[in-house]
Image: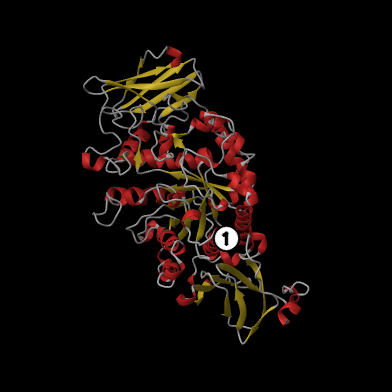
Amino acid sequence: MYDHNRIKNHVKGVESSSYELFGAHLEDGGVYFSVYAPAASKVCLIADFDGWNGIPMDRDFFGVWSIFVEGIGEGVHYKYRVYSADGKSVDKADPFGFYSEVRPDTASIVYDLGRYGWRDDEWIENRGKNYNDPLNIYEVHLGTWKIKEGFEGDDKFYRYEELKTTLIPYIRDMGYTHIEFMPLCEYPFDGSWGYQGTGYFAPTSRYGEPRYLMDLIDTCHINGIGVILDFVPVHFATDEHGLALFDGSCLYESDIPQMRESPWGSLKFDYSKPHVHSFVRSAINFWINYYHFDGIRFDAVAYMMNPDGTPNTPEYDCGVWFLKNSLYTLGAYHPDVMFIAEDAACHTKDTAPVIYGGLGFDYLWNFGWSSETLSYITSPYGMRTQNHELMTYPMFYFNQGLFMLTLSHDDVSNGKGSIMTNVYGRSQEEKFANLRAYYTFQMTHPGKKMNFMGNELAEFMEWSSDQPLGWNLLTYPNHDSFNEYIKALNRLYLREPALYAQDYNLQAFSWVDLQNAQNNIFAYRREDFESAPLFVVLNFSPYEKEYWLAVGFDSPFREIINSDDKKYGGSGLKNYALKTHDGYLQMKLAPLSAVILKPCAEDEMDAPPEGEDEKKAK
């Protein structure tokens, strides 16, 4: 197991599979333990098989402590008792441990990751970065998506193996293409949502054993669902058993106090230390190799690039170097895996390849789009005319990166309230109508999509890690109809290549009605150059409108979805037998509605219901 050259590479910061060198590894006749603690004066292995008494470990030149213990195997609980230079000791979980005790217990557990037999070869062979394929992500916090009624404590959580029969069928039925799990690296405090970790190589044991997480991901793949991991490369928990002051020195954090603490009360990784590069890059590589994740979302990237996360301070060269080096290296290892940045805030080439001076991400969350458009739909009708550009401005910088349109947990937590609560409306019916039009805008706007769980329910409650989603909302007609509309939008997105195949080709998008601020109307065209174009018309005013849509050619048209349809909770205003006149379509737009139209053959036109023509004549 000991490999001098590779340990040297770890210390130099160029190793990408350090999990093969450190941690607890099953070998013939026993287990080999290894930990990097260069400032420690002594390290002992303490474990349940020895009554936690402590067995001294051997140190090498680099500060790696190791020991082979015969006669033990999987399931052994262990820690490292690390003595600092002044002789004081702290019991630490294994930084490279593959499995942990359920919090509040903190021991690492010897685990054989090779026992699971994967069945997703076909999926892995055919997956890609989805630039020209549909990508519609459902963001999930496993502990609150659903809970078991009548159970308390950890017993209320659905376990990895149980989610196969609950979460996966729901995702398939709703028409999402991918799941994004909020952080699953082991973490001690539920209220951190997983963003303050202690075990970067161990999936949280709250929901079960590692092999059952593997099986969950495997089953997703077999069912045609991709899986993305939210990963935290910026900061880690301060808990004593974790990485903080690991060997009595600031091994993973900065030696400079003002560079050490994050805005979240945690400790920041110090990327001026080469071994930190090896540690974090290896963790990313580990989740892809061992758990077959199809994408990694990097949390809080802005703080890796600037100390305060804004352009107000000089760029942090070490963090930028880590991103470029790691994304280039991991991209070469995994050319079919997506690397997604939450937000780089102050870098102009986030999604450009490293060889062209970029950071190397495949996608970037568009915080500008979410903040601006949410401001629009939460504004009263009288202010929407002056706020018109909030909806149109994102397209003016859209060519600066490969953007993803996200309505994430950040938009519905920490005092922000839910989207349903904040959207403007003088009645509940108006709020639902606004929401249906808004989500149509998201799903038809260029860029890949992501929504946080509960958005599809029109959840009233702000999301909290202390409570599950309000699934009882679906017993109410308005919420059930809204959920059906989101399902219909998702499925329409999958059916229509014009909505995804040329997302990042500016020639495939054009405004048809850009400056109709007085009427609060937006219209645009989407196409993929192989099938018929789609036209989207949005009326964000509370009034019915007579509208002429400039399509530029003569053809019959049909509505392929209308947010005002009665089955989605609308009033039922629909346009039938649509034909162009000199390149224009005459339409009626329901208040607060969205319509998507498509050219069709004469025999595909929607005929008015029986008696509709007579009603119009009268």
Q: Mark 1 points at which residue?
A: 429
Q: Where is residue 306 in the image (x, y as percent from the top left)?
A: 28, 51
Taking depth in this image into account, of 310 and 337 the one nearest to the observer is 310
Q: What's the image's color scheme?
A: secondary structure
Indicate the quadrant where residue 362 lies: bottom left
- Dot 1: element: helix
- Tell me what residue is drawn at x 63 percent, y 67 percent: 562
Q: Where is residue 67 in the image (x, y as percent from the top left)?
A: 39, 20
Compared to 354, does 533 lie above or below? Answer: below
- Give the left or right position of residue 191, taking residue 521 as reference: left
Q: In which quarter of the image is the C terminus?
A: bottom right
Image quarter of the N terminus: top left
* Residue 144 percent location from the top left of the image: 52, 40
Residue type (three-letter) at the residue carrying disc 1: Glu
Give x and y (percent) for residue 441. Answer: 53, 65
Seen at 54% across and 62% down, the residue is 430
